[in-house]
Each structure stands twice: as C-alpha cells, then as structure tokens.
Image (tube, rainbow, N blue to C red):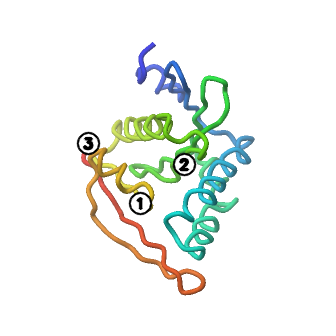
C-alpha cells in the first residue's frame, strides 16, 4: 500500500504501515482537545511565557475545536496500536492546529500530518499558509516555507505571544 494513494485520500483515510489519518467526528472532540491542550501545556512553556500559553489554550477552546470538527476540517492521526497521537486542522489553504502528543514526538507523526495536510491543500490551491509557533518554525523552514509576516499579541501579565505567518508555494 502506498503512503499517499489517491484512493485513500479520496475516502478521507490516509494510511501508511505505521499509522493512519482519519477525519475527526463529533464524538472525537475529547481526543482532539486532549491532544491540543496536553501538547500546549507541556511543550509551549519551553518557548513562551505563561500569558502566551494561556492565550493558546483559550484560542483552542471547546467552541473553536467543535466548530472545526463540525465543518469537517479536523483530522486525527493514529499509530499502529490505534492510539490517537496527533491532530491537524485544514481550512481551505491553511494548516491550523497541528499537534502531536509529547510522548509521540520525534517518531514522524508530525511529518505525516504535515504531508497529509499539504497533499490535501494542493488539490485545490497553489500555496499553503500557516501560523508557526516558535517551537515549530524551524520545522516549517526545513519543509520549504517562507516567512511572510510576524505578529506579536499582548497577553495577560504584559506577556507577548510572537509567531510567524509562513507560506509555501506548491
């Protein structure tokens, strides 16, 4: 079975030998939220102040996550044991909310989720846009993304959340 066969993508399931990516359903809400919030709470404090971490958690709130699931924009990545290990949200030509649980990072799941998102977007668009956190910026640069903007948002305690807007031509 190929890693990225057209027939698998057409039915919304992407499989490789070690993992699969499936469209999230409303009953998957708790899983998507757990992956998102656990990753933010464990990884982001190494890169961001507390005010920025709280901002991220509030941004990825129940309403936003459920809205994206209801709009069929959220995908879950499962390992070979069928444990949900990561998630990605795709909105038109934008990659959003790409997270892999900390204990599964470094095993290629993030790369597979990014590959899946890029392949999905490339069917309809000629460029991909994303907001890159400080922890992910170098990964996206290696994938061929270019910085096209920089933003700084003032958060609680006079902390700042800084991130780059990045783009990749397909």
Q: Residue furthest top?
A: 1
Please identify the quadrant where the C terminus is shown.
top left
Please tell me which residue is depicted at 26% across the width and 56% down the height of the picture: 146
Mark in front: 2 vs 3: 2
Position of the N terminus, as image quadrant, is top left
Sequence-wise, the earlier of marks 3 and 1 is: 1
Q: Earlier in the sequence, mark 2 or mark 3?
A: 2
Q: In the image, residue 66 lies at what x, y percent?
A: 67, 53
According to the picture, the residue beneath numbered tag 2 turns out to be: 99
Residue 103: image tag: none
Q: Secondary structure at mark 1?
A: strand
> In 3D space, how far apart are the residues under numbered discs 2 and 1 (Cα atoms)?
13 Å
Which x, y percent locates residue 151?
Answer: 39, 73
In percent of the image, x 55 and y 73: which residue is there?
52
User: Which residue is painted at 37% across and 57% down in the image?
Assistant: 137
Q: Which residue occupies the foreground of this view, 70 or 102? A: 102
Give the Cα separation between the discs numbered 3 and 1: 17 Å
- Splitting the image into 4 quarters, where does residue 57 fall? bottom right
Q: Secondary structure at mark 3?
A: loop
- Residue 165 percent location from the top left of the image: 35, 63
Q: Residue at x 35, y 53 (%)?
A: 138
Q: Which residue is mark 3?
A: 170
Instruction: Give the label on residue 131, or none.
Output: 1
Give SS at disc 2: strand
**Dot 2: within a 10 Å radius of its alpha carbon, few (fewer than 14), some, or many (20 or more) residues?**
many
The relative height of residue 39 versus residue 8 in the rendered view (above or below) is below
Question: Mark 2 or 1 closer to N-term?
Answer: 2
Q: Is residue 8 left or right of residue 57?
A: left
């Amino acid at each position: 079975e190929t890693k990225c066969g057209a027939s698998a993508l057409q039915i919304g399931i992407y499989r490789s030998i070690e993992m699969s990516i499936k469209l999230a359903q409303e009953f998957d809400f708790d899983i998507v939220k757990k992956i998102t919030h656990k990753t933010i709470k464990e990884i982001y404090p190494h890169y961001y102040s507390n005010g920025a971490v709280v901002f991220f958690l509030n941004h990825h709130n129940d309403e936003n996550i459920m809205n994206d699931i209801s709009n069929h924009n959220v995908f879950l990545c499962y390992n070979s044991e069928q444990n949900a290990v990561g998630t990605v949200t795709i909105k038109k030509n934008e990659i959003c909310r790409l997270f892999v649980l900390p204990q599964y990072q470094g095993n290629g799941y993030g790369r597979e989720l990014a590959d899946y998102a890029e392949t999905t977007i490339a069917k309809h668009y000629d460029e991909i846009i994303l907001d890159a956190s400080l922890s992910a910026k170098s990964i996206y640069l290696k994938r061929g993304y270019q910085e096209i903007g920089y933003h700084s948002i003032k958060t609680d305690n006079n902390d700042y959340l800084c991130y780059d807007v990045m783009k990749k031509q397909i």
